[in-house]
Image (tube, grey):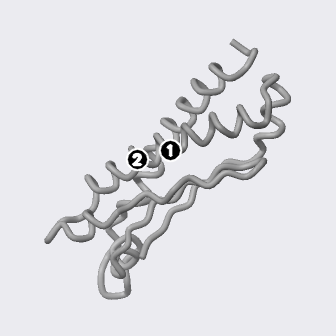
Amino acid sequence: MAEINVKWSGLDTLMEELGATAEATIDAAASAMKTTTGQVQAKAKQIAPKRTGVMAGNINVMPVKKSSTSVTGTIEAEKYYSSFVEFGTYKMHAEPFMRPAVDWGQSIFIKATMDKLKEATTFK
């Protein structure tokens, strides 16, 4: 199983700079993370090699986890051989699909977070 976790921490410093409450900042980041993980899931399914389509069909998003200072989004490729495809083995070359999807989604996450934070803060 290949699993990618994206964790954004340091939100307490950001909210001080923007004049936002902790709850508003975490909620904004969680909302952006939920949107982004869905888009990254779709991109990973698109990129994944497809002999039968089973591996791509088993790329799932887990619920977003929030703490007082961080937000974590998880996308899982649940077939046991997904990590062999992602990273390769000594017998086969790697065909990454999760890491490129996450790289693609970083700018989407940042933009979505900034848009949500603008709605939740005094900073406009």
Provide the residue designation for mark 1.
Answer: 34
Q: Residues within 10 Å of mark 1 (few under 14, many from 20)?
A: many
Q: Is residue 95 above or below residue 22?
A: below
> On residue 38, which mark appears?
2
**Residue 66 in the image, given as x and y percentages of width and height:** 67, 51
Residue sitting at 51 percent across and 59 percent down? 74
Query: In the image, is 46 to the left or to the right of 44?
Result: left
> Whole-Å distance between the Cαs marked 1 and 2?
6 Å
Residue 116 falls in which quadrant of the image?
A: top right
- The secondary element bearing badge 1 is classed as helix
Q: Amino acid at mark 1?
A: Lys
Q: Residues within 10 Å of mark 2 (few under 14, many from 20)?
A: some
Residue sitting at 53 percent across and 31 percent down? 112
Image quadrant occupied by the C terminus: top right
**Label 1 with label 2: CB-CB less than 8 Å:** yes
| Residue most extreme to the top | 124
**Residue 1 in the image, given as x and y percentages of width and height:** 42, 76
Residue sitting at 59 percent across and 32 percent down? 113
- The secondary element bearing badge 2 is classed as helix
